[in-house]
């Protein structure tokens, strides 16, 4: 359900969710459940809430991904709470477009109160909670759940000579498809999943050099997103309980060998070169003097948490990441009533994935609604039941 507001209008809710992608919608599911239970007389008053989305339409960051991207897991293991992703009938795993369609249906299915396009610009603490300034009015709330993700904060390393390079420099966020790259000399930088997938996509039309800081480390071919979620969860539980950990996801590898990457790798098209050290006008250069011509550099070097709207709060950070509670990874240690969802493992194991978003959203909503709201179901059997409702 999409809403719009008038510029200058002030609205008040108990819980304000900033971000309408997968994490924000998962939070909306549990908030909506509290509202539904209250309406049915099964609980006391539930918090009213709203979700702000900066995009023009539903689908979160998935609507901006490159066309050939595919999920790490089958549709049956890539769902948000309450509604299972419909089957995928194409090759491999579901595409980004399939996820967008799913998220749009999900939002409509639960009539979630999403307001778009609305960009939060500044969150400030008040005696009663928070005031959130946006480009379309002001919101006051007792609780803020920040779920803006990482897509709008791409990271590009700064290397000497960058300003002299005569070619184009792009980021993962700029790449949509291989169209326009035919016959070009392209350097793809980055040894994780986006670098491997984009390099594999381009090998059919361009002269591709794949550059990584360390040799590519593929996960076993039978590992998918479901297994990654289980590994991340076991690691987080062990660390929280002070027990020996079997190792996090990184201990198994950095790259999921989806079919397209596996085919390019097995055909010998993904032979990685070490990272270059500087730019020259016509390309790049290594410390040993070796040079390589390039028309385009594509930086698949990741993203940072998109938290510009929280700057007025002066949060304590470590390496750019806000400090959170040991008891609940999504809760801010600085500001009561401020939570983070979906940015990465630092705010919950696998919380930036479709399969992992629900667990942290459930626990976060339970904490956010603790002042009088009924507890949110949290057992594994209940979660499985939800997927078949």
Image (cartoon, helix red, strand yellow):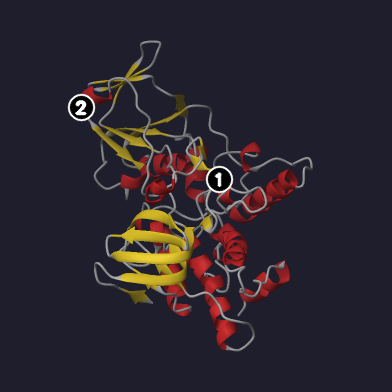
Give the secondary structure at mark 1: loop
Please determine whether, in this image, residue 39 is positioned above or below residue 163.
below
Which numbered dot is residue 166? Answer: 2
Q: Which residue is at the far top?
A: 288
Give the secondary structure at mark 2: loop
Res 67 seen here: no
Query: Tag 2 or tag 1, which sits nearer the N-term?
Result: 2
Residue 97 point in image, percent of width and height: 39, 63
Q: Quadrant of residue 44?
A: bottom right
Please determine whether, in this image, residue 235 is positioned above or below residue 31.
above
Question: Which residue is denoted by mark 1 in the rendering?
Answer: 256
Separation of residues labelled 1 and 2 (CA atoms): 33 Å
- State the residue in front, 263 or 361: 361
Q: Quadrant of the C terminus?
A: bottom right
- State the residue in front, 380 or 13: 13
Res 261 seen here: yes
Give the residue at x 38% y 19%: 277
Residue 128 point in image, percent of width and height: 47, 63
Give the residue at x 39% y 49%: 151
Q: Nearer the viewer, mark 1 or mark 2?
A: 2
């Amino acid at each position: 359900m999409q809403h719009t507001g008038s510029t200058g209008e002030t609205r008040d809710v108990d819980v304000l969710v900033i971000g309408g992608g997968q994490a924000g919608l998962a939070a909306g599911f549990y908030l909506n459940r509290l509202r539904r239970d209250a309406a049915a007389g099964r609980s006391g008053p539930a918090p009213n809430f709203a979700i702000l989305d900066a995009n023009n339409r539903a689908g979160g960051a998935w609507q901006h991904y490159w066309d050939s991207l595919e999920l790490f897991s089958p549709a049956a293991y890539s769902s948000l709470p309450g509604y299972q992703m419909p089957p995928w009938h194409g090759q491999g795993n579901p595409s980004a477009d399939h996820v967008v369609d799913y998220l749009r249906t999900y939002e409509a299915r639960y009539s979630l109160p999403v307001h778009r396009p609305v960009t939060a610009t500044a969150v400030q603490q008040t005696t009663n909670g928070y005031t959130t300034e946006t480009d379309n009015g002001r919101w006051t709330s007792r609780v803020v759940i920040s779920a803006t993700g990482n897509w709008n904060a791409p990271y590009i390393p700064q290397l000497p000579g960058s300003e002299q390079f005569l070619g184009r420099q792009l980021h993962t966020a700029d790449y949509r498809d291989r169209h326009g790259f035919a016959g070009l000399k392209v350097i793809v930088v980055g040894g994780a999943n986006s670098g491997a997938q984009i390099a594999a996509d381009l090998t059919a039309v361009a002269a591709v050099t794949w550059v990584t800081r360390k040799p590519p480390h593929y996960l076993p071919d039978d590992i998918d997103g479901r297994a990654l979620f289980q590994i991340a969860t076991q690691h987080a539980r062990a660390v929280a309980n002070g027990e020996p950990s079997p190792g996090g996801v990184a201990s198994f590898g950095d790259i999921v060998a989806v079919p397209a990457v596996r085919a390019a790798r097995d055909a010998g098209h993904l032979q990685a070169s070490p990272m270059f050290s500087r730019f020259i006008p016509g390309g790049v250069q290594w410390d040993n003097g070796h040079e390589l011509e390039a028309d385009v550099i594509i930086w698949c070097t990741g993203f940072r948490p998109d938290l510009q709207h929280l700057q007025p709060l002066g949060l304590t950070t470590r390496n750019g990441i806000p400090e959170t509670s040991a008891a609940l990874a999504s809760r801010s240690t600085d500001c009561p009533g401020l939570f983070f969802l979906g940015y990465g493992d630092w705010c919950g194991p696998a919380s930036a994935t479709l399969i992992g978003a629900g667990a942290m959203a459930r626990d976060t909503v339970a904490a956010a609604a603790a002042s009088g709201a009924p507890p949110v179901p949290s057992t594994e059997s209940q979660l499985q039941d939800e997927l078949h409702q």
